[in-house]
Image (spheres, helix red, strand yellow):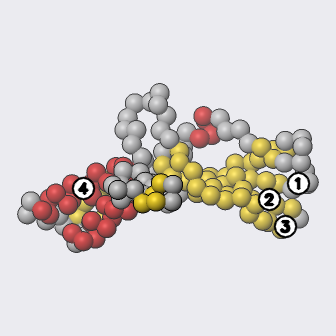
Amino acid sequence: MSPDWRTTLHLTDETTAIEFEMLPDGSGGFEIELTPAQTSTLGAGTKDFAVKAIKDGQAAIIAKGRLEVLPDPTQAGDKRTQAEKDLEVVEKAIRDIIAGGAVQSYQIQTTVGSRQLTRMTLEELRAERRRLLRMTGKSADRWRPIKPCFRGGRQRR
């Protein structure tokens, strides 16, 4: 890509959008090196990213995807992802409903503030629990390899 292009990395989540300037790498591409000072406001959790190239008022997204920002292991505090924290709250709400203490609302504290969720039915909570289990990789219904049941062209018994 021509060095006439300006290239930026965008990291976004539900409440934050941060843009970082990328620099030419000398071989036709662009690179970025982020310092702890630049990333300190990101907060842990899933982020969407996009690399945008701009020249003469024209812009194009040349790469996009998702990445997981991990908590700083040298800092004190809760190291769980937001999905893991949400899962804990949803499981508590399910237990409360089953125990007869139906919850009108509950609050999830996030790294970027708090989020208020209104009352959900038991079915909605269970669906949310399944979604969060898949997100955290803790789902029991994850794909598992199937062992072959044939050997040498004959069925094994």
In this orientation, which residue lies closer to the viewer: 4 or 155? Answer: 155
Between marks 4 and 3 in the image, the one whose residue lies nearer the viewer: 4
Q: Nearer the viewer, mark 2 or mark 3?
A: 2
**Where does the N terminus fall, quadrant-wise?**
bottom right
Q: Which mark is residue 72?
A: none
Q: Locate residue 111, reporting x and y percent.
A: 42, 47
Secondary structure beneath label 4: helix
The reply to whether the C-beta atoms of the residues labelled 1 and 4 are less than 8 Å apart is no
Mark 3, residue position = 57
Residue for point 42% across, 60% down: 155
Label 2: few (<14), some (14–19) or many (≥20) C-alpha neighbours in 10 Å: many
Mark 2 or 1: in front is 1
The reply, left or right, for residue 103 in relation to residue 70 is: left
Residue at the image point whose x is 83% and y is 54% from the top: 6
Q: From this viewpoint, is residue 132 visible? A: no
* Residue located beneath label 2 in the image: 53
Disc 4 versus disc 2: distance between alpha carbons? 43 Å
Q: On screen, 68 above or below 79?
A: below
Identity of the residue furthest to the left in this view: 100
| Residue on which disc 1 sits | 1
Q: Specify the amino acid type for callout 1.
A: Met
Quadrant location of the C terminus in the rendered image: bottom left
Q: Distance from label 4 to label 3 (Cα)? A: 49 Å
Q: CA distance from mark 2 to mark 3?
A: 10 Å
| Labelled disc at residue 91 | 4
Three-letter amino acid code at disc 2? Ala
Query: Under tag 3, what secondary structure?
Result: loop
Q: Amino acid at mark 3?
A: Gly
